[in-house]
């Protein structure tokens, strides 16, 4: 008999997964705010990889389409906000890089 077989079976409530998902969405979405503020204040995005942000933005756009496709408001909303923040950083990067 394996050790895990001795442990009681616990099925977490469904609301817990919703809470975890919402927490993950909020954390990953707002994580872009400090970067956006930094780029805006410094008027420089030299240290940001254009390729990384282009790929990331494309991936987030795909997640947004996926969320809309499966009818998941939280997935769609989180990725819409994340995409807006990422695109704002991209626009600032292109603007500031062109000046230098």
Image (cartoon, rainbow, N blue to C red):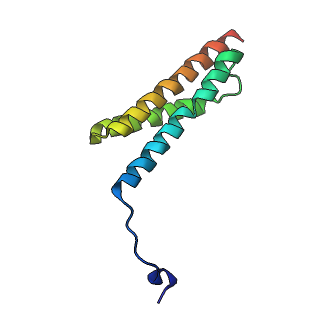
What residue is drawn where x is 40% and y is 70%? 10
Q: Nearer the viewer, residue 51 or 9?
A: 9
Q: Residue 18: image x %, image y %?
A: 38, 49
What residue is drawn where x is 46% and y is 84%? 6
Q: Residue 22: image x %, image y %?
A: 43, 43
Residue 98 position by quadrant? top right
Q: Residue 56: image x %, image y %?
A: 52, 35
Residue 36 position by quadrant? top right
Q: Is residue 76 above or below residue 91?
A: below
Q: Residue 37: image x %, image y %?
A: 63, 22
Quadrant for the C terminus, please: top right
Residue 44 position by quadrant? top right
Residue located farthest toward the top when viewing the structure as drawn: 99
Image side of residue 72 versus residue 10, left or right: left
What residue is drawn where x is 45% and y is 35%? 60
Q: Nearer the viewer, residue 76 or 54?
A: 76
- How many labels, in total? 0
Residue located farthest toward the bottom when viewing the structure as drawn: 1
């Amino acid at each position: 008999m394996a050790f895990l077989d001795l442990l009681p079976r616990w099925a977490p409530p469904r609301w817990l997964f919703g809470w975890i998902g919402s927490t993950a969405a909020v954390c990953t979405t707002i994580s872009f705010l400090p970067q956006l503020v930094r780029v805006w204040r410094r008027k420089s995005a030299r240290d940001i990889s254009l390729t990384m942000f282009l790929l990331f933005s494309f991936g987030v756009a795909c997640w947004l389409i996926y969320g809309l496709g499966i009818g998941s408001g939280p997935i769609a909303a989180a990725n819409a906000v994340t995409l807006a923040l990422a695109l704002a950083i991209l626009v600032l990067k292109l603007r500031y890089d062109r000046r230098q």
